[in-house]
Image: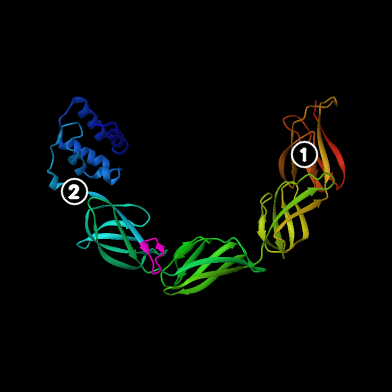
Amino acid sequence: MSPHIFAQLRRRIVAPGWLLLQRCQHDGVQVVPEALVEALWLGATQGADSFWRDRSFFARMGCLFGNATYSGKPDEELPNQTVGFWLQGVNAESEPMRVEGTLSQAGTDRFEVTSNCRNQVDAGTYDLLVGVPTVNGNLYQPVQQTVTTSDSEDTIVTVEVPEPPSVKARFVDGAEEDKDQRGAQITAYQNGEEVFRFRWMDEVYLDEGTYEFRTRPNQDNELSVTETFAAGDHKEIVFAMQHTVHATFTMLAEGSGVKLRGNYELWQDSEKKYDVHANNGAIILPGTYDVYLVNEINPHIEPGVVITTDNEQNIDITVPVGHITFIYQNANGTRAADKRIFLSRDPRGHVRPSGEPHALIPGTYTVKGWRGTYDEIVFEVNAGEDKEIVLRKKK
C-alpha cells in the first residue's frame, strides 16, 4: 500500500480496523477478508468523511496490497458512489441567498443539504425541497424540484427562492436621536410567548406576522416595539432610549488625598437607585443623588451630588478625616516592631497594619493589639487631626 493511502487511513479510521490493516500488510495477505473491510467500514462511519465510508472504494482499488482481491459482496451489491452536491440559492434579482433543504426519494428524506458547504450525497435522482431558513426555525415558502446527481463529478444546482421579510434594529439616544447607541439582545414575542431572539447588530429573516420586540440595554431602559411584517418587507425597528451616562465616583481623604476604599450606592428620596462599582462605575440617569460610601470602618454619605448629561463623568468627593498612626511599644516604653492591629467601629472591624497613617472619618473607634498582652483602647477621631495611638505591651 502506498504511504499516502496509509496516511489517509491513519487519520480517518479508528484503531481496530487500522491494526487489522497493518497486520494484513505485514503478513503479506493476498486476499482482503470481508471482516477487514467491515471493520474499516465501521471505523470510517464513526468519524471519517463519506469518501472513506464508501466500501466500493476498496473494491474498485482491486487490492490495497498489490494484487489482492476483495472477498466480500460483488460490486453490484455495494452502496452507491458518494458524490459532492453544491446547492446555490438566489432571489428574484439573482442575488445570493443562504438556503437549506432536503433531498428525498419515494417520500423519504435522504439527505439534509445547505448552501454553506459541499454536501455529501449518493448519486441518484431526488426531489429537492429548499428555502431560506428564518429565525423562527422554518423554511420560508420552500420550492420543490427534481435533481439528478452525477456519479462521476460534483453536481451544482441553483434554485431561485422567495426572499423572506427581514428585520434589523437601531438604538438611539433620546436626547440625541441622530446618534446611535450600543444595544442589547432583542427578544420577539407573539401572543405573549417568546418566538426567537437576535443580536442588536444583526439583520435576520423572519416569518410573516406581527411581533412585539423587547429589549433591556440597562436598568433604566426596558423597551418594546410592535411591528407587522408581510412578504417583501425589510424593516428597521428603532428603540428610543432614555439618555444615560457613565459615571464613576472616588472619595478622597481631606489633607492626604488617600482614596477611601469601598463601592458606592446612589440614593434619591430615601430609595436606593444604583449600586456603583468603585472601579467600573455604572450607567445611570442624570440627576441629583446622595452618594453612599459602603465601608464598615469609613462609611460616608455625600448629599446632593449632581450628575449632568455629559456621557462620561468622574466625580471626586473630598471627605473630612483624621489621620491616625498606631504604634507598638515594649513594656519598657521602647518602640516595638510593627505588626497588625484590629480596628473596629460599631462593632464592625478589620485588620490594619501599624506604623502608617490611616485616614478615618470622625467618630469613636476601638483598637486591639495583635498577638500580645495589650489593653483595648477606645479613642475619638476628629476631622483634621493627625495623631498617634500607642499600644504598650503589659509586663
Regarding mark 2 in the picture, which secondary structure is present there? loop
Q: Which residues are magenta?
A: 89-99
What predominant SS class does the magenta segment belong to?
Answer: loop
Image quadrant for the N terminus? top left
Which numbered tag is attached to residue 54? Answer: none
Q: Nearer the viewer, mark 2 or mark 1?
A: 2
Pinpoint residue 273: horizontal percent, then vertical percent.
67, 61
Pinpoint residue 388: horizontal percent, then vertical percent.
85, 37
Residue 318 drawn above or below residue 145: above
For residue 319: magenta? no
Label 1 crowd (10 A; few <14 / some 14-19 / many >=20): many
Q: Nearer the viewer, residue 82 or 335?
A: 82
- The reply, left or right, for residue 6 in relation to residue 377 is left
User: What amino acid is at disc 2?
Assistant: Pro
Pinpoint residue 9: horizontal percent, then vertical percent.
28, 36
Q: Using the rendered image of the protein, determine whether residue 55 is visible from the camera's viewpoint.
A: no
* Residue under label 1: 367
Q: CA distance from mark 2 to mark 1?
A: 87 Å
User: What amino acid is at disc 1?
Assistant: Val
- The reply, left or right, for residue 158 in relation to residue 183 is left
Regarding mark 1 in the picture, which secondary structure is present there? strand
Pick whichever of labels 2 and 1 is earlier in the sequence: 2
Q: Nearer the viewer, residue 268 or 378?
A: 268
Q: Nearer the viewer, residue 263 or 70?
A: 70
Residue 66 drawn above or below residue 132: above
Residue at the spot x=49%, y=73% of the render? 227
Residue at the spot x=50%, y=61% of the render? 202
Image quadrant for the C terminus? top right
Q: Using the rendered image of the protein, determine whether residue 291 is visible from the camera's viewpoint.
A: yes
Which numbered tag is attached to residue 79? Answer: 2
